[in-house]
Image: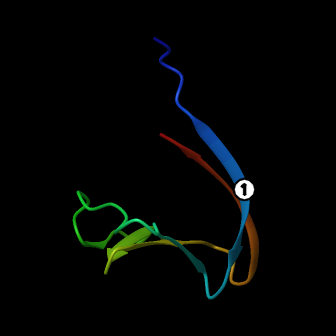
Amino acid sequence: MSDEAARGNASVPVQYHQFGISNEDGPTGPDLERGHNALVRVADGLTIVITGLHTGDVDVTVAR
């Protein structure tokens, strides 16, 4: 069994200093505490990531 995580990378559009992560099959981060830590906010089944960039694209890498 490999300890290496599955990874993906994509360019994600940013508007108003944020982009959202959602899941068509249900809420994202159901085990995450709803709230805000200045970088990530979890609310209503959506995870919102705050960026320094106002508008444009950011490179995002995810691992599971």
Is 37 above or below relative to 31? below
Residue at 72% x, 56% y: name it: 10
Which one is in front, 17 or 44?
44
Which one is in front, 2 or 61?
2
What colouring does the structure picture have?
Answer: rainbow
Residue that sits furthest to the front in the current view: 25
Image coordinates of residue 50 in percent, x first then y, are 52, 73
Image coordinates of residue 46 in percent, x first then y, are 40, 74
Which one is in front, 20 or 50?
20
Image coordinates of residue 28 in percent, x first then y, are 37, 64
As drawn, is 31 to the left or to the right of 40? Answer: left
The amino acid type of the residue labelled 1 equals Ala
Q: Residues within 10 Å of mark 1 (few under 14, many from 20)?
A: few
Is 64 above or below relative to 34? above
As drawn, is 56 to the left or to the right of 53? Answer: right
Q: Quadrant of residue 34?
A: bottom left
Quarter containing the N terminus: top left
As drawn, is 23 to the left or to the right of 8? Answer: left
- Residue that carries the numbered disc 1 in the rendered image: 10
Q: Secondary structure at mark 1?
A: strand
Residue that sits furthest to the top in the current view: 1
Residue at 54% x, 22% y: name it: 4
Residue that sits furthest to the bottom in the current view: 16
Residue at 66% x, 85% y: name it: 15
Total number of numbered discs in the rendering: 1
Image coordinates of residue 12 in percent, x first then y, are 70, 67
As drawn, is 61 to the left or to the right of 10? Answer: left
